[in-house]
Amino acid sequence: MTNAEKFVNTYNEIDNWLSKRGKYDKYVPYAKKIKYLSSKDTRLKLFREDLLSYGELRNAIVHNSLKRDEIIAEPHKRVVKRFDYILEELKNPEKVFPRFSEQITMLSPSSYINPLLEQMGKAIFVQVPVFEQGGIVDIVNCQTVVRWLANQMQPLGRLDVSNSRISALLPYIQYRQNFRFIEKGATLYEAYEAFVDHQEESKNHLDALFISEDGSNKSKILGLITLDEIVGTLGVKEL
């Protein structure tokens, strides 16, 4: 099978997927389906320009053929591969779990700060949920600790944190309860959309997106996603 034939087959699959997604009949043009559905589907929004360009390329390949079903142009192998990748992302998008599954360290307000400082000394960036009976109540991170430390300086620049507890950090959190939950069956694109929605609603970046069994604060936490992680995974622009 030639690159052109593979490309046209992929186009037909995506066109059929769009029709089913939007419940369109066969007379609705490919480009119109993309332009309308991309306002509702994060995947299509992110792939919109590629999909529209590939639609034009498909028309050029098919409509410029000399004979019926004869293709005279060959798209580049890289383009065919990219188009196939988009098709796979539309049909079988990756889920947040197990992609971002991890053992989450949680501390209670009564926990001593020392273990948190040790953890932060081993990692570039740490988000630690503060947990009480009933669920997560907030998140502390490196910036929280720096703000707290700046207010603990004693004469001669001494610091004594040996008896300090996590509860002392809570007033220094910049954005309180700046987190959301997502169910483990959600896609990477739904996770990205959660960050986008929060940014539009609150005008600040979401600190973390917690993965739980059912997307609630009541069930076991299975993982954590940060904005940098989801942006890096999907290869999209920073919010």
Image (tube, rainbow, N blue to C red):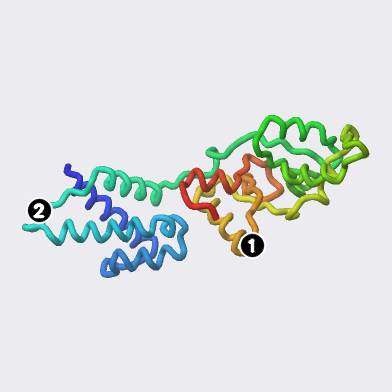
Residue type at mark 2 is Glu
Residue 19 falls in image quadrant:
bottom left
Q: Residue at the location (73% across, 45% down)?
A: 143
Residue type at mark 1 is Lys
Which percent across, then down, holds residue 224?
Answer: 62, 42
Q: Is residue 185 left or right of residue 78?
A: right
Q: Is residue 168 left or right of residue 137?
A: right
Q: Residue at the location (35% across, 66% down)?
A: 33
Nearer to us: label 1 or label 2: 1
Q: Which residue is outermost to the right?
A: 155
Q: Is residue 87 left or right of residue 234?
A: left
Residue 24 is marked as none
Tell me the quadrant of the picture where the C terminus can be found: bottom right
Q: Which residue is outermost to the left?
A: 67
Which percent across, then down, holds residue 61?
Answer: 17, 56
SS for dot 2:
loop
Sequence-wise first label, 1 or 2: 2
Q: CA distance from mark 1 to mark 2?
A: 53 Å
Observer-nearest of 105 and 134 = 105
Tell me the quadrant of the picture where the N terminus can be found: top left
Q: Is residue 199 left or right of residue 129?
A: left
Measured along the vertical axis of the image, is residue 113 above or below residue 75? above
Residue 203 is marked as 1
Measured along the vertical axis of the image, is residue 45 above or below residue 222? below
Q: Residues within 10 Å of mark 1 (few under 14, many from 20)?
A: few
Q: Residues within 10 Å of mark 2 (few under 14, many from 20)?
A: few
Observer-nearest of 17 and 146 = 146
**Which residue is disc 2 drawn over?**
70
Which percent across, then down, holds residue 51?
Answer: 33, 57
Q: Residue at the location (39% across, 51% down)?
A: 90
